């Protein structure tokens, strides 16, 4: 009896200690992100990597003023004044509109609200993912890395989709892991939460729609190989919620453009510009640095089209670039590897950009790679494809390939940074165990 009580007390004590550490990590995370928000202030101006916040700010003011989703002047990509636009995330624009309606057109209020929200959620979700995939200690280290990761701090205060998008992706993975384990006591509530998380990720960036089928195939495979009942109805619920979240904007787009536009009108532009022959076989992340504007590349005969019609035409021409010269496209795609994974300082980048790059991805990349190697060495033969590690790596590989085939910027890689932080945490824990001669398996947390 005494032994049982002792074990129970020890488990409770460990849980209490974990909770206190996690609270401290979350507190630091929130403070760091609030300081970033205060640094960016109550104005919206150009800053490295977050120029799009000017567009979201102006668009929210237009919606608040009763002009709908439009701009008062010709705007990126090549949208005429007062013409409808679907180029930007409806969800994030509405977030800014609501905040401005309550607090007035004060960007700082929006920055602070999202800084606090993601400052809490990102480290908590990284802890839950790290604990689920590996063990509790790795989860705590993953939460700490998320709290101090400069890129995540920087973008948490930017008036752009990245902060909420990355947070939604982390939530998707944690909930998917719970669904795959088929041991949740509230499967329908889990399905609803997962549907909302996926819907928020898709409404932030429609690209995530390409990833969703792969992740659900993995869930079904994991359940099938584990001998559990296949999650047919949960999948239907998740899919239904995602459709319901997208459908209002699809109808809205059809009414404005007179054609089917699922969500946003940015894929065609990105694919056309990203694969244009002007690059040859060497991609340039920001083409304007060469003295050529993106708008100059659009054929004159297409300039009279509205945003949706132009996007459709550009997608067709982008596909034709691939058909006409697949060899060039292959080399061009390979050339995107360097800017996509750039971790060293650059003369073309300002102080903030170089600090963010070197002291986040630059430091963490070796540990991410080491953590992946460690997890692969510990994989269970015959069942690796059903493990959460496989799902995380599948996402990282597929997401990378999508951007290498289209358009590459460092901020497009940030979701991968986030999901790889648990691997970096694993490597750090393994290193600590090695230095202290601790006889514990860093992957499982079991005594060796």
Image: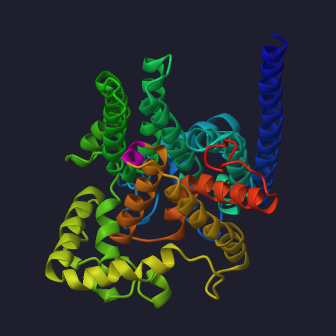
Would you place residue 159 above or below residue 49 in this image? Answer: above
* Helix, strand or loop for the magenta stretch, by majority: helix
Which quarter of the figure has residue 83? bottom left
Would you place residue 301 above or below residue 136 in this image? Answer: below
- Give the residue at x 35% y 37%: 246
Percent position of residue 212, x then y:
35, 44
**Which of 386/152 is in front?**
386
**In the visual, does 42 lie left or right of 193?**
right
Percent position of residue 200, x then y:
47, 39
- Give the residue at x 35% y 32%: 223
> Can residue 52 be seen by looking at this rendering?
no
Which quarter of the figure has residue 39? bottom right
> Can residue 366 be seen by looking at this rendering?
yes
- Give the residue at x 64% y 59%: 424
Residue 299 on the magenta segment: no
Residue 383 on the magenta segment: yes
**Which of 274/59 is in front?**
274
Q: Which residues are magenta?
A: 382-386
Percent position of residue 372, x then y:
54, 60
**In the visual, does 370 lie left or right of 190?**
right
Q: Quadrant of the N terminus?
A: top right
**In the visual, does 226 lie left or right of 93?**
left
Would you place residue 416 above or below residue 68 in this image? Answer: below
């Amino acid at each position: 009896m005494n032994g049982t009580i002792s074990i129970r007390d020890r488990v409770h004590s460990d849980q209490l200690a974990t909770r206190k550490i996690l609270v401290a990590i979350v507190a630091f995370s929130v403070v760091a992100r609030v300081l970033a928000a205060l640094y960016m202030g109550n104005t919206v101006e150009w800053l490295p990597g977050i120029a799009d916040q000017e567009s979201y700010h102006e668009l929210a003011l237009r919606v608040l003023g009763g002009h709908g989703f439009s701009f008062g002047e010709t705007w990126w990509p090549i949208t005429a004044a007062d013409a409808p636009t679907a180029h930007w995330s409806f969800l994030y624009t509405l977030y800014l509109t609501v905040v401005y309606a309550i607090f007035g057109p004060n960007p700082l209020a929006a920055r602070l609200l999202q800084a606090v929200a993601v400052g809490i959620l990102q480290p908590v979700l990284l802890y839950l993912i790290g604990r689920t995939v590996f063990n509790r200690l790795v989860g705590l280290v993953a939460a700490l890395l998320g709290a101090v990761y400069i890129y995540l701090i920087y973008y948490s205060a930017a008036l752009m989709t990245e902060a909420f998008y990355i947070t939604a992706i982390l939530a998707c993975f944690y909930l998917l892991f719970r669904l795959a384990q088929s041991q949740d006591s509230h499967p329908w509530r889990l399905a609803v939460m997962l549907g909302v998380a996926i819907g928020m990720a898709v409404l932030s960036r429609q690209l995530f729609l390409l990833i969703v089928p792969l992740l659900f195939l993995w869930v079904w495979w994991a359940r099938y190989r584990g001998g559990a009942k296949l999650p047919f109805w949960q999948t239907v619920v998740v899919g239904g919620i995602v459709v319901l979240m997208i459908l209002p904007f699809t109808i809205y787009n059809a009414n404005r453009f007179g054609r089917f536009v699922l969500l946003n009108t940015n894929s065609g532009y990105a694919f056309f510009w990203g694969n244009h022959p002007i690059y040859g076989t060497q991609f340039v992340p920001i083409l304007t640095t060469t003295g050529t504007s993106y708008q100059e590349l659009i054929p004159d005969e297409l300039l009279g089209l509205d945003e949706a019609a132009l996007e459709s035409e550009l997608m067709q021409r982008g596909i034709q670039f691939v058909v006409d010269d697949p060899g060039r496209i292959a080399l061009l795609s390979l050339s995107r590897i360097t800017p996509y994974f750039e971790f060293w300082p650059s003369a073309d980048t300002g102080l903030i950009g170089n600090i963010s790059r070197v002291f986040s991805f630059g430091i963490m990349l070796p540990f991410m790679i080491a953590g992946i190697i460690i997890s692969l060495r510990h994989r269970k033969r015959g069942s690796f494809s059903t493990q959460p590690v496989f799902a995380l790596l599948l996402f990282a590989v597929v997401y990378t390939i999508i951007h290498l085939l289209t358009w590459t910027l460092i901020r497009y890689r940030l979701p991968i940074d986030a999901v790889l932080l648990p691997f970096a945490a694993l490597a750090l824990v393994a290193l600590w165990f090695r230095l202290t001669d601790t006889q514990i398996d860093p992957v499982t947390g079991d005594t060796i």
